[in-house]
Image (cartoon, helix red, strand yellow):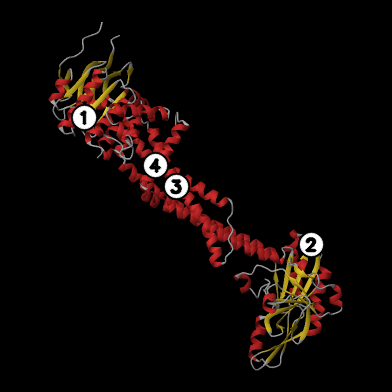
Amino acid sequence: MPSFIVQFDNVRKHYQMGLVTVEALRGVSFRIAAGEYISIMGPSGCGKSTLLNLLGCLDRPTSGRYLLGEQDVSRMDDDALSAVRGTRLGFVFQSYNLIQQLTVVENIEIPLYYQDRPEAESRAVARELAARVGLADRLEHKPFELSGGQQQRVAIARALVNDPLVILADEPTGNLDSTSGAEILRLFDDLNAQGRTIIMVTHDLGVGQRSRRTIRLRDGEIESDSNPPGDFP
Amino acid sequence: MIRGLSIAQLRRTVRLGFKGLWLHRLRSLLTVLGIVFGVCSVIAMLAIGEGASHEAQEQIKNLGSQNIILRSVKPPEEQKVSERDSQSRVLQYGLTYTDVKRIRATIPGVTVVLPARIIREYAWRISRRVDCELVGTVPWYPEMRNHPVATGRFFTETDMDGRANVCVLSAEMVPALFPLEAPLGKFIRVGGNYYQVIGIMAPRARTAAAEKSAETTQVPSARVFLPLETAKLRYGETLMRRRAGSFEAERVQFHEVTVKVDQLDRVMSVAEALQRLLEYGHKKKDYAIDVPLEMLKQAEHTKRIFNIVLGSIAAISLLVGGIGIMNIMLASVTERTREIGIRRALGARRQDIVLQFLVETVILSGVGGLMGVLLGVAIPFIVTWTAGMKTIIVVWSPLLAFGISALVGVVFGLYPALRAAQMDPVEALRHE
Ligand SMILES: Nc1ncnc2c1ncn2[C@@H]1O[C@H](COP(=O)(O)OP(=O)(O)O)[C@@H](O)[C@H]1O
Ligand SMILES: [Mg+2]
């Protein structure tokens, strides 16, 4: 079997708005191999966030099939999806989404907390990752004491803490100035260089050039896919 | 519902809950205030009520639950007559020797009959004066009325037969008459006669209730006990009383007769028999029958009603407290929608969210309950200290109040927690 870690097979997502059905995704199919760095681009309202939510198992497709690793996650129940999110996925959001009353190291730990990992162990992993994103001296700080770029680095550390199959990022540089934005993108480059699979929604054409593959959406359909992986023998 | 929950996880959730609540100390405190006061008032009211009813019951028990007390009462129509023409009239009423003899002869199961005469007098010691009740009674009075002698002795049959000039003082008399000396062996003067003090009764708890009820059988504090025969010799059968300008005389043979029934379960039937016997022998209603057992039952009944009322108040205040907590928790859930979304995205199951919010509510109500218990235990002490009221904290009441408040936390925390858990992660993440 080919080592695709994500397979979307004619995935549709409809939203019922009273009498009107909004077709946010109308039959999307693609496959992603391990270690890819993919940017998803397209005009506003074309379905990027919807696609990312489906990829992130935060939502279920209306129809179609989604294989994450070997698992068909498109028909899983809520608890099982929570487990998938907690063990196989890492999220980086545009607005960082750190929990304000927790410290840096506690924020990084959250995914492990829900996997019931021993406290000492998760604390150690969280410290190590904080150091890796350059925040070793900010462990006990609260998010509001950090700059935007630092907060986003905390979020990236948090996305790595459960050693995920895929990292999903929704416009991670959208709220940052260009300098911190560039730092964050460099961090993503490093991660990809170390073998992490990254799927990033972005408006930034520069990001499109960094990533090796760009999927363009238009009106809920794939307009172009710059560099799809070939079939493995 | 809760699957795969480890102790470690629960402990961490509790720690997290404490931390979160501590962060908003003031708000948390205000949230639980309803519970605090609910719990506190339950415990305090229960303690005060228990104290009051205990005191009442104690007083009734002091009369002896196996006793029936017959008293002479001036008939109401006679009172009016004596007020109208108050010249030299001798009023005759009350319990008589004949009554006592009849009771002894006809009612089975009556073991002892204790007659007493009560006369209001001044007792003197040199220049000190005390307004007191002179009680002419029999030597077995202390054991029958559960009122022991503290020092010295009570008078004996010999004193009785010899019409000895001896007396026993109630404890309350001593400081007024003998502030500096030991009373035993000393003499006091009552109505022109001297009596040697041979004993002091044990003190009795004096209460507002006892002082008000001078008319009933409760023991008023200042009493001088004389042998019945001595009292008869000194005062005869007729009691003179001077009133403004005129004087009035009453002839009462016994002011009080105590009947002791040999078995507790026969008290009520003996009381009925006594009622019939006295009805037959008296034209006017110049007597009263007090049954301490009946009073005790009444007191217990009153206490039950009090407890029901108290329970209702407690239930309402805890309900209000619970609603207060629920209100704040609902607001907190809305406020933390984003946090819920983040946690769900990072792998929290619905039950983890339920647990998180439920634990917070239970901590709130538990801590509130604990504070209420502390306050509720402190207040009775303060009441006792400042108002001099007796209070009793029943052991189970703090436990019960605390248990209920924790339960309130679970019940009223469940709905907000479920609301939090039902949120759609995508919607929650989009929430501003
Ligand atoms: N929860 C929702 N309910 C109804 N319509 C939605 C919902 N989420 C997204 N949509 C619609 O689906 C389409 C795609 O939205 P989205 O994926 O957010 O686009 P993008 O992120 O590319 O701007 C839009 O037309 C949007 O209005
Ligand atoms: Mg979007």
Q: In which of the image's four quarters is ligand 1 placed?
A: top left
Query: In 3D space, how far apart are the residues under numbered discs 2 and 4 (Cα atoms)?
Result: 67 Å
Query: In 3D space, how far apart are the residues under numbered discs 3 and 1 (Cα atoms)?
Result: 41 Å
Q: Which mark is residue B19?
A: 4
Type of amino acid at the residue the image marks with label 3: Ser
Cβ of mark 4 under 8 Å from ligand 1: the answer is no
Q: Secondary structure at mark 4?
A: helix
- Subunit that carries the residue with mark 2: B
Q: Secondary structure at mark 2?
A: loop
Instruction: Please report whichever mark, 2 or 3, sits nearer to the chain's N-terminal start.
Output: 2
Quarter residue A175 falls in: top left
Type of amino acid at the residue the image marks with label 4: Lys
Q: Secondary structure at mark 1?
A: loop
Q: Which residue is denoted by mark 1 in the rendering?
A: A172
Query: In 3D space, how far apart are the residues under numbered discs 4 and 1 (Cα atoms)?
Result: 30 Å
Residue positioned 37% across, 51% down in the render: B26
Residue positioned 79% across, 77% down in the render: B185
Type of amino acid at the residue the image marks with label 1: Pro
Q: Check if mark 3 and mark 1 are on a common chain.
A: no
The quarter of the rendered structure image containing the C terminus of chain B is top left
Q: Which residue is denoted by mark 2 in the rendering?
A: B262
Q: Is residue B215 left or right of residue A67?
A: right
Label 2 crowd (10 A; few <14 / some 14-19 / many >=20):
some
Q: Check if mark 2 and mark 4 are on a common chain.
A: yes
- Subunit that carries the residue with mark 3: B
Q: Which residue is denoted by mark 3 in the rendering?
A: B365
Q: Secondary structure at mark 3?
A: helix
Give residue A37's position: percent from left, percent from top: 21, 19
| Disc 2 + disc 3, Cβ < 8 Å | no
Query: In 3D space, how far apart are the residues under numbered discs 2 and 3 (Cα atoms)?
Result: 54 Å
